[in-house]
Amino acid sequence: MKTYRESMNELQFSPQQKQEMIDRLTAQSARPPRGRAIPLRRVCALGAAAVLTGALCLGAAASGVLKPAAQAFGVVFGTAPAQTEIIDQIGRPLDARATVDGVTVQADAIIGDTYSYAIVYSIYREDGQPITADPDPNRDGTLALRFGDWNTDVGHMGGMHGTAWFFDEDPADNAVQFVQLLTADAPLKPSTATVHLTDLKQGIGEDATLLAEGSWELRFDFACEDSSLELPGGQSFTVNGEAATLNSVFVSPLSLRIDYTVDTPVPQRKNGSSGMADGASTPQPVFLTLTDGSRIDLTGFGGGVRPEGDTTRCELSGVFDQILPLDTIESITIGEATIPVNGR
């Protein structure tokens, strides 16, 4: 929880600071645990988001054979029949690739909803040799690989938060995969996505091994089907003793976004800057209750805050660790407020 609280302590970042933050923190290649609370957070102004879309192609990597979206995202979001069906409905395969010095980076598939998106890439050598002879997987199956720099530009001028990691979908081929999960703070207009990746490395810091030097740039269109559901707001609850009102809740099989207002202003810090202290900045208990009675804790999701007169506007949002069919979600709870989903 420490990293989430620290990220919530800063209200605003310049565009340069935002880019430096995401470049530095995404060098951490290991996939965070379920219900993650990772440092890759950007505190920013709130807003709606738009649908991200993808080129209508079928894609795969090492052999050049194209793969469906459900296959590309199977390791990331699950391979149960209900999950596969949803991924193929709202995901889109891609066929964008770039080759530099014998190494190809290919965008395999994209999946998106109103506020979030995920992209899977495959990286492989054209000569059929593996990217590394010693992939050195972590205990959770992620690979100790990273790009020196990566940036996905979808024309969004606001902030984003999320995570990224490497994995090996099929150890029998010579490709490894890279996945990005990102959530925006404001509308994302349909446009051409430009992805910039540099210098594939293994390890961290000065001891990192350069596996492939170069700069890969990919471009593709968007066209994902949005399956988000907007739930009614207006419920009242308390945030550390302060009255709060739920403004809106958006949920899809991919992600969740909660927007609420706390009836207290953003306090001024000693240096004169605005920042959340121990009040509204403290993460509220947020969890999903599924129809089978189990619960998923999402308190570690990212988000942001901003002042609105004498009140504070707060957002909590992120991508799930698995695809969740909406008919399996009974309700969403934040603090004392519970919003029914299934049987609405």
Image (cartoon, rainbow, N blue to C red):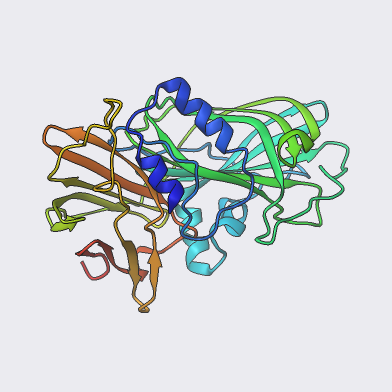
Where is residue 16 shown, x and y percent of the image? 47, 20
Q: Where is residue 63? Give x, y as percent.
A: 78, 45
Q: Which residue in the rendered view is the most extreme toward the bottom? A: 292
Residue 190 in the image, given as x and y percentages of width and height? 40, 30
Reply above or below: 21 against 298: above
Q: Horizontal placement of 190 versus 92: left or right?
A: left
Residue appearing at x 38%, y 39% in the figure: 51
Based on the displayed image, in which of its 4 quarters is residue 216 positioned? top right
Residue 123 placed where, x, y %? Answer: 73, 40
- How many numbered discs? 0
Looking at the rendering, in which quadrant would you find the C terminus? bottom left
In which quadrant of the rendered view does residue 26 lie?
A: top right
Q: Is residue 299 visible?
A: yes
Give the answer, above or below, for where 254 lies relative to 100.
below
Against 68, residue 42 (above or below) is above
Q: Is residue 82 left or right of residue 121?
A: left
Instruction: Name the residue nearer the viewer: 281 or 149.
Output: 281
Question: Can I make out residue 192 in this image?
Answer: no
Q: Is residue 206 left or right of residue 130?
A: left
> Which is more toward the observer, 259 or 196?
259
Q: Residue at x 24, y 48 (%)?
A: 279
* The N terminus lies in quadrant: bottom left
